[in-house]
Amino acid sequence: MSDTLVSSDWTRGGDRIVFQHCQSCGHVFYFQRSFCPACGGAEPRQSVSGGLGTVHAHTLVQRAPSDEFRAITPYAIVLVDLAEGFRVMAHGDPSLRIGDAVIGRIETLAGRPLPYFNKVPDVC
């Protein structure tokens, strides 16, 4: 595993979404593992997501779980199917709807780095 790439993941304080793909079966998955959850293959490769995707689900949170999140309530939680072939749960612009094309970045919310998605601007 590339420690440099893994440490750049937002779950470790970085500014990227790092995913893995299996060299044996091609399965793409998210959250770091030392093996493929589909075939058990060892040493999956890490890659950085470009952040482009489509909203799969959307909800607006009205009752936050902590004081830090209460300060930003209401906020949107979205499930996004990323172009690389995996799904991620993240925060998003409250105006997002299912089927919207989105682009993500890592943003500091409630004092921590979290994935955040906005609608891809329409191109004329």
Image (tube, rainbow, N blue to C red):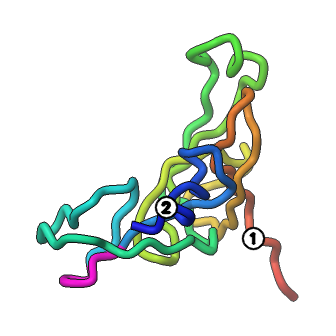
Left or right: where does residue 76 sit relative to residue 59?
right
Q: In the image as oriented, which residue stretches furthest toward the right?
A: 124
* Residue stretch rendered in magenta on the structure: 21-26
Q: Quarter of the image containing the N terminus?
A: bottom left
Type of residue at label 1?
Answer: Val
Residue matched to label 1: 120
Membership of 30 in magenta stretch = no
Q: Quarter of the image containing the C terminus?
A: bottom right
Type of residue at label 2?
Answer: Asp
Viewer-proximal residue, 110 or 82?
A: 110
**In percent of the image, x 68 and y 48: which residue is there?**
92
Above or below 79: residue 36: below
Left or right: where does residue 124 sit relative to residue 107?
right
Membership of 24 in magenta stretch = yes
Q: Determine which quarter of the picture holds residue 5.
A: bottom right
SS at circle 2:
helix
Within-10-Å neighbours for mark 2: few <14, some 14–19, many 20+: few
Above or below 61: residue 50: below
Q: Nearer the viewer, mark 2 or mark 1?
A: 2
**Which disc number belongs to residue 3?**
2
- In percent of width and height, residue 49 lies at 56, 71
- In percent of width and height, residue 50 lies at 63, 74
